[in-house]
Amino acid sequence: KNHPTVGRVPNGGLIKYVPDINYADGNNLLIVLNDPDFTTSARMVSAINAVYSGIAKAVDASSVSITIPESSKSDLVSFISQIENLTLVPDSIAEVVIDERTGTIVVGKDVKISPVAISHGNLNIQIKTIEEASQPMPFSSGETVITKKEEVNVEEENMKMKIIPSSTTIDEVVRALNLIGVSPRDMIIILQAIKKAGALHARIVTI
């Protein structure tokens, strides 16, 4: 056990007092994003204005101000419901979430790393991408297609350092480590070292 005296209680919080929340002042509605992001805020404005012309304006990365149409002021609940049901793809933030107590690691999609040399004990890792050409059948109208194939080489030997190319994702590194049964504790140390070296282009969140 990493921290035998520390634990988590899911849904263990208790709110004894809920303050009054004024989400609209009669003319304007303010939407606050749980995860502030300028791209998501801009996309929300575009989605709202595509249906209700010109009523939404981004205040900052965390909030969007909406001018309530006159026709909707008498039924604000329905108007807010319509806003909630608009389709929006939020911008994703590259994150690696680590729980040091349990050894849990959650890696976001396509988290990239810059070229970096990794050596941990007697562990060597090399991940590279190989491009292959797929040729069409003779006398066909097809075109040559370039496909990418991942090659993962993992070895345990005397201390050496391997260069990880820039096209490698953290997901590939974690898969390579899992292939030889690297412990979650060692994996966390390696990821934190890559981040400290400035090669991990993602935010590490420790819970």
Image (cartoon, rainbow, N blue to C red):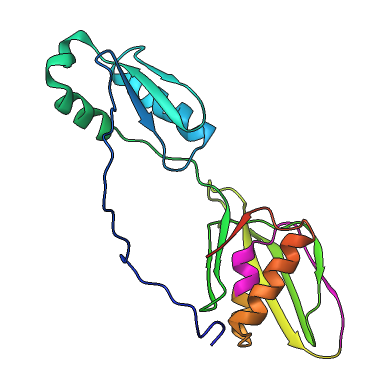
Q: Quadrant of residue 121?
A: bottom right
How many tags in the picture?
Answer: 0
152 over 134 or under it: above or below: below
Q: Quadrant of residue 118?
A: bottom right
193 over 3 or under it: above or below: above
Q: What residue sits 28% from the left and 28% below the top?
A: 22
Residue 169 within the magenta-colored segment of the rendering: yes
Between 11 and 148, the one nearer to me in the picture: 11
Residue 100 screen position, x and y as percent = 57, 74
Residue 167 within the magenta-colored segment of the rendering: yes
Between 164 and 78, the one nearer to me in the picture: 78
Residue 196 screen position, x and y as percent = 76, 61
- Confirm whether residue 138 shows in the render: no
Q: Which residues are magenta?
A: 159-174
Residue 28 screen position, x and y as percent = 31, 16
Residue most extreme to the left: 74
Q: Horizontal placement of 170 versus 9: left or right?
A: right
Q: What residue sits 54% from the left and 82% below the top?
A: 3
